[in-house]
Amino acid sequence: MTDNNLWTQNISSGASAFSETTPRSARQEKKSDVAKTYAEILAGKMASIKDDLERMEKEREDIEEIDTLRRDAEERGTLRPSVETPETIRRVMGDGTILVTTTENGKIVEQYRKKPRLVPVSNAAAPPDAPTSEKVKMEPAQNLLDMLNFA
């Protein structure tokens, strides 16, 4: 028989190289080792899940206790409103303008825009025979002090 015929004969008969070369007791030992390892991993996972569930239950109880205390304080009128400091948000817009927004307690208190300083730059897209005014274009200049101070 040729090698190809042996291969097809083994495949069709359901024989595998592992079962032919490894004795039955060695296969059973490997299966039992795999089962033991799997059982150890599963036991470890179950223990960690139980610990996580206990921790989550404790945190839920703490949150419920805090909520009841807050509700009681609101009913008695002893709950002080939280004092929020002003928050300043700075955004650099696409055209180089800096938008500065100041908020307190989620409400906009102040908002202004700082226009960028424009500098002349040569316009590479302009044709060579264009007038001088078209060969130069104005672009916003990046200034580190503006980025830091926004003043």
Image (cartoon, rainbow, N blue to C red):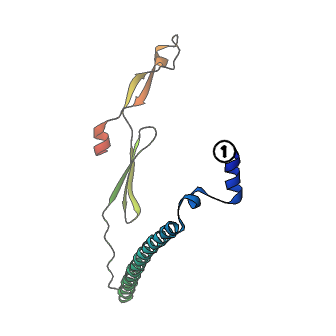
Give left or right: position of 13 versus 42. Answer: right
Out of 109 and 119, give the one closest to the viewer: 119
Query: What residue occupies the far top of the structure in this picture?
Result: 129
Q: What element does badge 1 sit on? A: helix
Percent position (x, y) of residue 107?
41, 63
Report the residue at 48% width, 72% height from top.
32
Q: Would you place residue 94 above or below residue 55 in this image?
A: above
Displayed quadrant of residue 24: bottom right
Q: Residue furthest front?
A: 1
**Residue 151 in sight here:** no
74 vs 41, nearest the viewer: 41
Whether residue 6 is visible here, answered yes or no, is: yes
Q: Position of residue 50 (x, y in %)?
A: 42, 80
Using residue 105 as the reference point, say whether residue 22 is left or right of it.
right
Q: On screen, 76 above or below 42?
A: below
Residue at left offset 31%, top offset 40%: 146
Residue indicated by mark 1: 3
The crowd level at tag 1 (other Cα within 10 Å; few <14, some 14-19, many 20+) is few
18 or 49: nearer the viewer: 18
Residue 144 in percent (x, y) is at: 29, 38
Q: Quadrant of the C terminus?
A: top left
Callout 1 amino acid: Asp
Closer-to-camera residue (60/33): 33
Residue shown at the point (31%, 79%) measured from the top left:
80
Residue 127 position in % (x across, y down): 53, 14
Q: Residue at x 70, y 59 (%)?
A: 13
Vertical relation: 43 (above or below) 102: below
Numbered circles on residues, count: 1
